[in-house]
Image: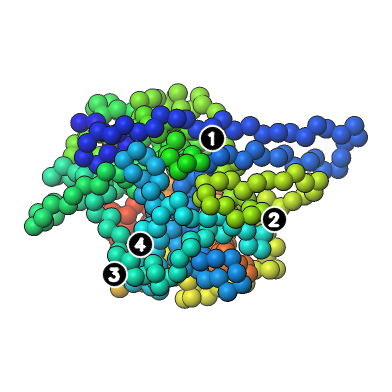
Amino acid sequence: MIRTLLATTALATLIATGAYAQTATTPAPAETPAVQAPATSVQRADGSLVTNIIGESVYNGTADNAENIGKVSDVVFDKDGKAQSVIIGVGGFLGVGTKNVAFDYSKLQWAEKNGERWLVAPTTKEQLTAQAEFDAKPYAPAAAPAAPATAPASGTDTAQAPAAVPAEPVKRADGNLATNIVGQKVYNGTSDDAQNIGSVNDIVLGKDGKAESLVIGVGGFLGLGAKNVAYDFGKAQWAEKNGERWLVAQTTKEQLQAQADFDRKAYDPAPAKTASNDVTAPAPVAATPDATAPDQTQTAAIDKSALTEMPIGQIRGEDMKGTTVYGANDAKVGEIGDVVLTPDSKPDAVVIDVGGFLGIGAKEVAVGMNNLKFMTDKNGKKYLYTTFTKEQLEAQTAYNKSSYTQNRDKQRLIVQ
């Protein structure tokens, strides 16, 4: 049985709009060649990426005494594919005791603080903590009796023994969670010769919060030649295969590879000039004669002398998520997407999403907590510096949640 992407129990028609085509405006060349070419301006997109929201710290304002009240851990879509709320994790230490609550997506605001964009929610930590805990079970992937209780992100985990039948069945939600979609492998059908044609790396949201496209990472061997392309969100479907849930796109790997590479620069956060009541509204980019304005996606543009080393014992597990990670020669290699805990709830490793960086395809790499060096700026933004090279990350065994405990030594990379 095939179902649309957001449906959990029945068919639901979603949007059928594609991603905006991105174009860059190149300044006209001067008559006399300059020592340094002018920076290419980027046309901002009227929308946002889910990965630019999930992992973002949330503040209760922009005053000097503004507080970090939590971190976005998920985005909830309604049955029509529109972002309904964000899930904010509040309280706890190192991820233990954290409470997830829903907050109205439309009430979030981007605001400027010290030249950076802050995600602001007009509420307090106490008000969020007082809310009922968000129940993700109604959004959990429905599976056949022989399938695992929750569909693994990789789509290849071995089926486990079915859990005991609950006294009362869980009422399915008419929607879905972003984290149920991002990371899923994509297949071109459900026949016996169906192929894995890529993995979902992101979701493009329109200005109104509606999901428009999936960003699918395709191609390459060990990530070489991998590229990200946009695929119409409304055409993706869930299908059942051997008791598991497959994400199906009616296309081929060759057709996806032939598409233009998805340009996420137009969606990347940029400092806002004024507060906006639209979380997906892009920050305005003013023309500037300064061709050497730093690109905050590159470590070279960050003044390390202004950063402070942060003892790892002072960082909550939830707060590690979204941290930008750099490797050899200070090249950006990815972001922390998750934290692996030991049976006694202590951090054992951070899971770094390296897909799309350094030409490496979609891949998760677990890095042990040993010798990790977290840095923070005056606004609380965190950075993790390592010495890993592209070759090391390509050769490293990918993190697999279901087999990590048994293969910890192989799947856990250590900073020397």
- The first of marks 1 and 4 along the sequence is 4
Distance (Cα) linking label 1 and label 4: 32 Å
Check disc 3 and give the amino acid type: Pro
Q: Give percent across and percent down for residue 122.
A: 48, 63
* Residue beneath disc 2: 301
Q: Give percent across and percent down for residue 306.
A: 68, 68
**Residue 396 appears left or right of 80:** right
Check disc 2 and give the amino acid type: Ala
Dot in front, 4 or 2: 4
Q: Is residue 34 visible?
A: yes
Q: Give percent across and percent down for residue 189.
A: 29, 27
Residue at 13%, 55% in the rendered image: 163
Q: Nearer the viewer, residue 287 or 371?
A: 287
Residue at 68%, 50% in the rendered image: 295
Q: Give percent across and percent down for residue 198.
A: 40, 35
Mark 3 in CB contact with mark 4 (< 8 angstroms) = no
- The first of marks 1 and 3 along the sequence is 1
Q: Which mark is residue 101?
A: 4
Q: Which mark is residue 343?
A: 3
